[in-house]
Image (tube, rainbow, N blue to C red):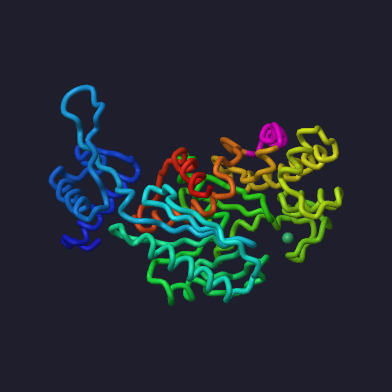
């Protein structure tokens, strides 16, 4: 710390105050002073600056029982917007949220190409359109986070995206040449785990989120930070071998977990058996409703292999909470209890196993939340989800 550097100290205090306001959602000046150990005078001066900058707002509590109604401070959600993008195979989802993480607009572009230049062009076009549409706020678009379904290095270079067959691509640089807003790239499973932590599970600092759609991705939030490994590639848990000499996988090995416990493997297997090329969740739901034994057996097998991998993950990471992101698990009755019954080793320790309440949009919501976190420069965010769900739905419809 630079002793006597007043500007530096002011900056530290400012950050501390923003962190507390974000953490509490709403707080009075007096409580802010207690929570930060800063004097009332310092709080007053800093709060005046933040109000002037439009970053926070004052609200008077109407239903305060006794005495003077306190004036509360909270983040000004309307001060700017965050843009989250989910760059998935076949479609790109864009969601723009306010600074409280509340989606204000969403759209999905279907893509039938994996060509990098075509996709880059589309991204630039969409981002430019959204940024010009939302310039009428104090800070405009404060940041853009793009979810990548593949390996992203710590320097945010795309190392490999299997379904696009992209190798060593610097999308961040290519976009920054055209767009004058902070841009960040992050692995999709990491963003899903971040959304779970920020929007739903405020109670924990140690959370794993396994996404089971095309392949299996694992987002790991340990002590409220992403666990990335040496290169940034940690979490490629779908390629853990669970069946020696089992089904061949694109990665070059045999018997990888995602060949047995991802939704894509389940769909592949079932569509082969039923000779239906484009299976949907609706097909599966109606067969389950009819009590179709073959489909039930396949689901039981899916749960069995899923449990094997989860057991290994729990022993490796000792999470507090494990969130499973899967539509099939949401559809199959009692799936969570069935998995829990398989996780009965005396060594495995975790507090709770849950199925996601956010679902497939967790990547894009996590992207918005991460852009907000970076803009505010806070260690963690707690945003509310109930409101978001409804607004998100209405935006999509
Ligand atoms: Zn593999």
* Residue drawn at x 53%, y 60% as measured from the top left: 147
Residue 12: name its quadrant.
bottom left
Tell me: residue 383, above or below residue 363: above
Q: From the top left corner, tell me how far across and down residue 359 is, in percent.
A: 58, 45
Q: Nearer the viewer, residue 328 or 345?
A: 328
Q: Going by the picture, which residue comes out furthest to the front?
A: 397
Q: From the top left corner, tell me how far across and down residue 98 is, in percent.
A: 38, 51
Q: Going by the picture, which residue comes out furthest to the top?
A: 66
Q: Nearer the viewer, residue 245 or 391?
A: 391
Asked whether, in this view, residue 107 is left or right of residue 330, the answer is left
* Residue drawn at x 38%, y 47% as measured from the top left: 100
- Give, as a single range, the part of the protein colored magenta: 332-348
* Residue drawn at x 80%, y 37% as measured from the top left: 296
One can see residue 155 in this view: no
One can see residue 391 in this view: yes
Q: Nearer the viewer, residue 58 or 47?
A: 58
Tell me: residue 250, above or below residue 384: below
* Residue drawn at x 44%, y 55% as measured from the top left: 96
Tell me: residue 135, above or below residue 192: below
Q: Quadrant of the N terminus?
A: bottom left
The quarter of the picture showing ligand 1: bottom right
Q: Is residue 76 magenta?
A: no
Q: From the top left corner, tell me how far across and down residue 5 is, in percent.
A: 17, 62
Residue 151: name its quadrant.
bottom right
Count the marks. Answer: 0
Q: From the top left corner, tell me how far across and down residue 200 is, in percent.
A: 49, 40
Asked whether, in this view, residue 234 is left or right of residue 94, the answer is right
Asked whether, in this view, residue 361 is left or right of residue 173, the answer is right
Q: Is residue 338 magenta?
A: yes
């Amino acid at each position: 710390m630079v002793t006597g550097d007043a500007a530096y100290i002011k900056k530290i205090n400012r950050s501390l105050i923003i962190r507390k306001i974000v953490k509490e959602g709403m707080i009075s000046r007096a409580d802010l002073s207690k929570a930060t150990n800063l004097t009332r005078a310092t709080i007053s001066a800093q709060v005046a600056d933040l109000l002037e900058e439009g970053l926070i707002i004052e609200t008077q509590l109407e239903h305060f029982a006794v005495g003077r109604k306190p004036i509360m401070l909270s983040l000004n959600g309307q001060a700017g917007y965050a843009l989250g993008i989910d760059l998935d195979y076949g479609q790109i989802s864009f969601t723009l949220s306010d600074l409280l993480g509340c989606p204000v607009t969403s759209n999905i572009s279907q893509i039938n190409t994996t060509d990098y230049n075509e996709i880059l062009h589309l991204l630039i076009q969409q981002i430019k359109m959204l940024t010009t549409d939302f310039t009428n706020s104090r800070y405009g678009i404060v940041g853009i986070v793009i979810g990548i379904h593949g390996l992203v290095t710590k320097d945010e270079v795309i190392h490999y995206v299997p379904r696009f067959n992209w190798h060593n691509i610097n999308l961040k640089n290519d976009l920054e040449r055209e767009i004058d807003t902070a841009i960040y790239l992050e692995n999709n499973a990491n963003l899903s785990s971040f959304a779970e932590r920020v929007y739903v599970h405020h109670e924990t600092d140690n959370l794993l989120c396994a996404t089971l759609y095309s392949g299996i991705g694992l987002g790991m939030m340990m002590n409220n930070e992403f666990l990335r490994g040496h290169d940034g590639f940690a979490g490629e848990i779908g390629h853990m071998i669970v069946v020696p000499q089992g089904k061949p996988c694109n990665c070059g090995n045999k018997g990888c977990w995602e060949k047995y416990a991802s939704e894509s493997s389940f769909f592949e297997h079932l569509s082969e058996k039923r000779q239906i090329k484009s299976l949907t969740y609706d097909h599966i739901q109606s067969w389950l409703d009819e009590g179709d034994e073959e489909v039930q057996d396949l689901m039981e097998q899916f749960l069995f292999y899923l449990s094997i991998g989860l057991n290994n993950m729990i022993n490796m990471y000792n999470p507090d909470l494990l969130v499973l992101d899967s539509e099939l698990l949401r559809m199959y009755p009692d799936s969570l209890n069935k998995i829990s019954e398989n996780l009965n080793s005396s060594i495995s320790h975790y507090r709770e196993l849950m199925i996601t309440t956010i679902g497939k949009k967790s990547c894009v919501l996590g992207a918005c939340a991460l852009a907000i976190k970076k803009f505010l420069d806070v260690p963690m965010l707690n945003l509310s989800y109930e409101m978001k769900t409804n607004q998100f739905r209405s935006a999509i419809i």
